[in-house]
Amino acid sequence: MPRSGDELTAGEWAVLALLAESPTHGFAVARAMAPEGEVGRIWSVRRPLVYRAVETLTGLGFVRPARTVSSPTGPQRTVLEVTPVGRRALMRWLREPVAHVRDARSMLLLKLLFLTRSAADLEPLLSAQRAHFAQLAQRLAGAAEEAEDFDRALLLWRLESTAAATRFVETMLDEPARARRGQSVR
């Protein structure tokens, strides 16, 4: 069964975001997504999976071939560009807070990376994320009060993880405005 655009993986969102920055070919995207690449520091994807992500994104109508260019090291490369539909999906994804604390290490950091690279204001996402984590913490605290044995331990762990993620978001919100817009702080 085909997936919808709302069901993209972290790697697929990262590929889409890279292509939205500038039309390029899959090899360049794979280089950025390698463990030592700029995006790979947060979420690395092997080259075959980058090409699979491109196929998925193309199938969803989020990217399309723009042109081919010659390569000094092999066959011609297809330059890919993001479609208006893909750009709207990406913008929507970048504004949405992550649903689970476990996704903060991957999805939230990816969103912050790409928003920073585009010099966008991080405050709307960070404020929405803080509000979401606050609601989650409230639910977890209530459930932990009533839980017993290992269930209580698990809920307390999740509550502490939520508190740590919330502190990170609050620290980011306390950064000077220019740092939140992707400009370096000196």
Image: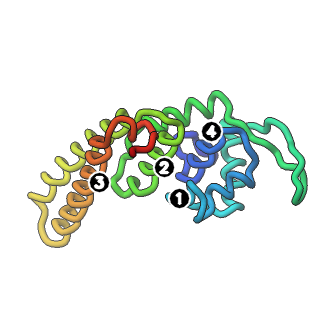
Q: Secondary structure at mark 3?
A: helix
Distance from the alpha carbon under mark 2 to that under mark 1: 8 Å
Mark in front: 4 vs 2: 4
Q: Which residue is mark 2?
A: 110
Quadrant occupied by the C terminus: top left
Q: Are marks 2 and 1 in contact (CB under 8 Å)?
A: yes
Q: Nearer the viewer, residue 69 or 91?
A: 69
Seen at 74% across and 51% down, the residue is: 26
Name the spot of residue 11 as percent of width and height, x first. Answer: 57, 53
Name the spot of residue 134 as percent of width and height, x first. Answer: 22, 44
* Chain-order first, disc 2 or disc 3: 2
Distance from the alpha carbon under mark 2 to that under mark 3: 15 Å
Amino acid type, residue under disc 2 in the picture: Leu
* Chain-order first, disc 4 or disc 1: 4
* Chain-order first, disc 1 or disc 3: 1
Q: Which mark is residue 21?
A: 4
Q: Which residue is mark 3?
A: 165
Amino acid type, residue under disc 1 in the picture: Trp
